[in-house]
Image (tube, rainbow, N blue to C red):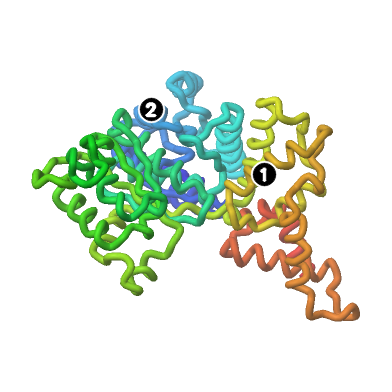
Amino acid sequence: MNILLVEDDSDLAELLCEELEGEGYQVVTVHSAEAASAQLGELLPDLVISDLRLPGRNGITLIPEVKAMNPAPAILLITAFGTVNQAVDALKAGADDFLTKPFDMDHCLLTVRRLLEHRKLKARIAGEQFHGMLGESSAMQTLFKTIRRIARADGPVLILGESGTGKELVAKAIHQESDRQKGPFLAVNCAGIPNELLESEFFGHAAGAYTGANKARLGLLREANGGTLLLDEIGEMPLALQAKLLRVLQEGTIRPVGTDKEIKVDVRIVTATHRNLEALMTEGLFREDLFFRLETFTLCVPPLRERGDDIALLTRHFLAQQQQAGKTKARQLSHTTWKELLNYSFPGNVRELQNAIERAAIYCEGEEVLPQHLPQRLRQQQYKAMENIFYHLSSDALPSLSHVQQDYVRYVLDKTQGNKAHAAEILGVTRRTLYRWLDEG
């Protein structure tokens, strides 16, 4: 969670920043409303904490700017000169809460946590999705914010990610967030078009340009004029066509097959691939100059296994879809089913999860999805994982549950860079319990 702190008292700002970062939040501190305005669009915070009285503009003037953002951050105002009238004015203007100095730090942190949780809950109740993508994990929230930033520009975008992560949805989101949103969005899979038709498919052709070309064709680049063209699996594009695509990016013109006329096009090129383009360059299968042009803006879509609780969120969403479509009576997953699902690595990512839930919903005849309703490969995964960890141990050397717990706690702390608040959240315990476990270890 990102917090923008607007406070001109440097001592208080430092104290608040330290306490908030200790809770696991990412904090950016500025000292005036003017500086905060400059940061809003870049940081896209989840919460703005602002002093009411600041040099220059006061904190209330930030409220309309914050509320105009989509999604709007929560707003917490603080002041040493708090009165009932000021509090009412701030709340009427759109602030979510109001604290007066001097305030109790524990109460402040509780208020921050409550505001962020309320904002998260509102988004969930409203079924908020980001252009068809659902994700509350920090990885996905970072992706959504990056998409908004990239959408404002007009240069090429390279989307990297494993199969099934939703790269086309990311491309559509870039288009819908951009000034080109009223223009066309076209997507083509470079691996799905025969090589002999690729040039005509992209650049169009004149009537009679080759045998069978009875009518002239515009081609994808002209059809997408004023909008966005997604070139999926760009790593499969032949070298000869790569050279011509590079020219389009450099000159903004195309030459249809069978003509010598240059035609101006205005289209944003977005490319996507699950392959390693740098490895393809080493093999001479992908042009370096095209790669460096395409990577003007690069987005990496996280695999599902790195998205934490998003697996549960997406599972409930996909099951609800099946219910609403009248395809199942299933309303929930059994405890054992959840355990098996969450222990699986999902190499096929979101697409594999969606297919698994659709299958389970169809096979489930009651209201609870059981393990046998899941695909076989999901049910086998957790046992393979346990064997990988303990296969070399004899029955006499198997560790105690307490020992395994200590090892796992240390593993989680290592993965969270020692952030105890985040580690406790992942482990599903309070920080007090986590500290007790560490003392016992």
User: Pointer 1: residues within 10 angstroms few (<14), some, or many (20+)?
Assistant: few
**Residue 55 in view, yes or no:** no
Residue that appears at 62% across and 44% down: 106
User: Pointer 2: residues within 10 angstroms few (<14), some, or many (20+)?
Assistant: few
Mark 1 vs mark 2, CA separation in Å: 31 Å
* First reached walking from the N terminus: tag 1 or tag 2: 2
Disc 1 residue type (three-letter): Ala
Residue that appears at 39% across and 43% down: 171
Question: Of residues 96 and 306, which is closer to you in this image?
Answer: 306
Question: Of residues 93 and 396, which is closer to you in this image?
Answer: 396
Q: Secondary structure at mark 2?
A: loop
Q: Secondary structure at mark 1?
A: helix
Question: Of residues 187 and 429, which is closer to you in this image?
Answer: 187
User: Where does residue 110 sit, x and y in percent of width and height?
Assistant: 61, 40
Tell which residue pokes out farthest to the front in this image: 211
Q: Is residue 112 left or right of residue 13?
A: right
Q: Which residue is mark 1?
A: 312
Disc 2 residue type (three-letter): Ala
**Residue 72 in view, yes or no:** yes
Counting the numbered discs, the total is: 2
